[in-house]
Image (cartoon, grey):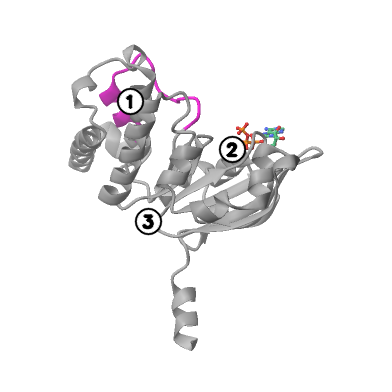
Amino acid sequence: MGRVGIDARSTPPLLDVSDVTVRFGGITALDKVSFQVEAGKIVGLIGPNGAGKTTLFNCLSRLYEFSEGRIAFEGRSLTEVQPHGIASMGIGRTFQNLALFRTMSVRQNVMLGGHSRTSTGYLSNALRLPSVRREEQRLREHVEQVIELLELGSVAETVVADLPFGTQKRVEFGRALITQPKLLLLDEPAGGLNHEEVGALMDLLRRIRSELKLTILLVEHHMNLVMRVSDQVVALNFGRKIADGTPAEVQANAEVIKAYLGAEAA
Ligand SMILES: Nc1ncnc2c1ncn2[C@@H]1O[C@H](COP(=O)(O)OP(=O)(O)OP(=O)(O)O)[C@@H](O)[C@H]1O
């Protein structure tokens, strides 16, 4: 018994969200939300419109400050780093509205995502010291690996604006993956995709999780996708957590059914 307790304490979860509260004037967007994400899992964050999903994502990527509670990543409080330091901590994210440079090529977009992660300083960059050239070479190799993983090779030189929406979303993925995150936050990855593209996205999520040993937290309205790819699902409603468990447990939860279908369905 004692040993189990010690082991559990010595390996904190990858992400530990504890009693996080966010208020906007009179609105409580998040109300003492707590949940944990274990390394290597795919976790779906669901809830009706206005439930607080995006607010939580914005807290995780330090775009919003939370007034109460704590978020720890690998045991370290997120507030220990500056908002721009989140990527170097190992957290990457995509955005609901794609944050791509539309007039640049796929390869250039992926490459630019990697520049937030390079460690050489301003002076060594200006002088183009050997350390900078080595780092740039490593980045270029990594860009090619990400492009291959996402099957973007045939469009690598194509300007992003000329690509179908589903492909643009994969480029957005690439920009997040190039930072080599341990935790990838995906904001509505299935939004705007057709049936076939959603199927391909499911395969891709499973593939990047197993090949890159990533942990994924996704906000998603596409229930079929969430329930099929997630190991764990967290449901929010009006800023409160109403369920947290396996997809089957959450689907059968009376409060979740009520939140989605209205009071008469409970
Ligand atoms: N910057 C802000 N200023 C004021 N209110 C906000 C802000 N961001 C979110 N809210 C409010 O907080 C609540 C939660 O919104 P949030 O966008 O997090 O929900 P959501 O679950 O992501 O919804 P959706 O599925 O529609 O994207 C809503 O009532 C929203 O109006």
In front here: 39 or 245?
245
Q: Secondary structure at mark 1?
A: helix
Q: Amino acid at mark 1?
A: Asn
Is the Cβ of the residue at disc 1 closer than 8 Å to that at disc 2? no
Labels 3 and 1: the sequence-earlier one: 3
Q: Amino acid at mark 3?
A: Gly
Q: Amino acid at mark 2?
A: Thr
Q: What mark, if any, has residue 109 been given in the picture?
A: 1
Left or right: 147, with 185 as reference point: left
Mark 1 CB within 8 Å of ligand 1? no
Image quarter for residue 106? top left
- Is the CB of mark 2 within 8 Å of ligand 1? yes
Along the viewing direction, whichever of 255 and 116 lies nearer the viewer: 255
Residue 250 lies in magenta, yes or no?
no
Where residue 73 appears, as percent x and y from the top left, is: 49, 57
* Residue at the (31%, 30%) spot, across then down: 110
Q: Residue at x 56, y 52 (%)?
A: 250
Q: Is residue 130 above or below residue 234?
A: above
Give the structural element (helix, strand or loop) at label 2. Answer: helix
Read off the magenta span.
95-113
Q: Which residue is depicted at the point 61% across and 41% down?
A: 47
The x, y position of residue 216, in whole percent, is 42, 47
Question: What residue did someone put label 3 on?
Answer: 40
Q: Which residue is mark 2?
A: 54
Quarter containing ligand 1? top right
Q: Specify which label sits upstream in the sequence, 1 or 2.
A: 2
Dot 3 alpha-carbon crowd within 10 angstroms: few under 14, some 14 to 19, many 20 or more: some
Question: What is the distance, in whole Å, between disc 1 and disc 2 at their CAs?
Answer: 24 Å
